[in-house]
Image (tube, rainbow, N blue to C red):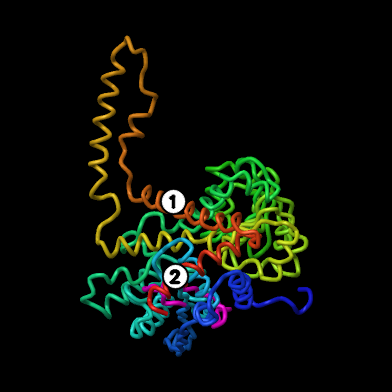
Amino acid sequence: MEGLREPSFRDSVEIMFNRAAALMDMSPGLEEKIRVCNATYTVRFGVRLRGKIQTFTGYRSVHSEHMEPVKGGIRYALNVNQNEVEALAALMTFKCALVETPFGGSKGGLCIDPRLYDEHELEQITRRFAYELIKRDLINPSQNVPAPDMGTGEREMAWIADQYARMNTTDINGRACVTGKPLNGGGIQGRVEATGRGVQYALREFFRHPEDVRIANLSGTLDGKRCVVQGLGNVGYHAAKFLSSEDGAKIIAIIERDGGLYNENGLDVDRVRDWIAAHGGVQGCPEGTYVADGPSLLEAACDILIPAALEGVINLGNAARIKAPLIIEAANGPVTAGADEVLRNKGTVIIPDMYANAGGVTVSYFEWVKNLSHIRFGRIQRRQEEARHELIVNELERLSADRELGWTLSPGFKEKYLRGADELELVRSGLDDTMRAAYQSMREVWHGRDEVTDLRVAAYIVSISRVAASYRAKGL
């Protein structure tokens, strides 16, 4: 890595916040209130495993309580630390404000490599971590609602929800204490795919604006665009799958822990995913050419670069060599503040993380609402919708039977039109609407103010403005 100017992840968030705040008319006191992290709880707890007690360190950080509950994932990784958790909590505050989910920002983490433990051991560790947080109301449907993040998923969320239920036996809204649960445990359809689906919807919205596409030195639609995806976890996999199968994009490179795969004609995302599941990495996969130096593929010639794993992968060490004219941050903080400046000076357009990966928290919001309302989306109105549609179709069929009119219904029209929306379709509709509206709010600032030259500053200005309005409404 070149020089000593590379800021940490937390520094990067601060620098980006400051760039936006400098363009806003806020009192120094309010600006400081929005910047600082309200509280971070550090817990160290012991679990008896394999005949001895092991001590684990975990964190839960609350950045802003301008709205409650606060929201943010729990990640399991060895490099989890207080600075990282606080930076992620700040991002969650701004992310929730940008997509207008009524939450403050929070984040949690546990210093652990989940691959080193079997399922039963992970359940013991997760339940004990949850116990420590629940008894301090750091997991609570009305105060603090976690979700999956790196290293966690539906399974861990189900354990946390059950642990909350054991400790709060009369809380009728207990299932809303955590989101990202499995469907049979109070989850919602479309949550697993949500963040990757949100990346797809973000790119679709970007490509709806030819003026924005031209700024990125691109043209046309997503069809045929060459994409490089770094990280084929939950987010990267779903983003790559949907973009390739539904929008005609070509995934020419996939970067994983043990190297990368390259195929100019496009990789079959599902086959690569299956190979990784069976072999633990991409090496030997027949879908493309194996590249031992995986990170070098970040610098491959492509149209869209999708970093979907860790923070800081695009930094001062490689930013100048990045060829992609458009980067969409599917991960949190994949571009450091130093690299961001280099890329902006090159004219690279970056669709920022606080917008691009907000699909997860958006659908988490839907799940939270579902848990509080105790009914799945579509249950009441779906058949009524179908009945009304059937009236129209029957009338059309009656008219089409009149040979003098000379027209008939298109094949498949009846089946498509008659079907009422189920929960998955409603979730996708709500997510699409959210991503479109959030992009419009950023775009308005990006194009409406001469001093705003990139989408990241635009996103921060929109978010900080909304948080500031919430604090003012409280009388601060």
Q: Toward the viewer: 124 or 206? A: 206
The residue indicated by pointer 1 is 433
- Tell me if residue 68 is in the magenta stretch: yes
Q: Toward the viewer: 267 or 10? A: 10
Amino acid beneath label 2? Ala
Circle 2 SS class: helix
> Residue 415, which numbered label?
none
The residue indicated by pointer 2 is 469
Amino acid beneath label 1? Asp
Q: Quadrant of the C terminus?
A: bottom left
- Above or below for 249 versus 228: above
- Above or below for 11 versus 385: below
Question: Residue drawn at (24%, 36%), measured in percent from left and top?
Answer: 388
x and y, in percent, of residue 471 in the image: 42, 75
Residue count near mark 1 (Cα–Cα under 10 Å), binned few <14, some 14–19, many ≥20: few
x and y, in percent, of residue 189 in the image: 37, 55
**Can residue 164 be seen in the rendering of this structure?**
yes
x and y, in percent, of residue 462 in the image: 52, 64
Circle 1 SS class: helix
Report the Cα–Cα distance between label 2 and label 1.
23 Å
- Above or below for 186 versus 57: above
Magenta residues, as a range?
A: 64-84
Going by the image, does 187 lie left or right of 89?
left
**Can residue 278 be seen in the rendering of this structure?**
no
Question: Residue drawn at (23%, 74%), measured in percent from left and top?
Answer: 171
- Tell me if residue 333 is in the magenta stretch: no
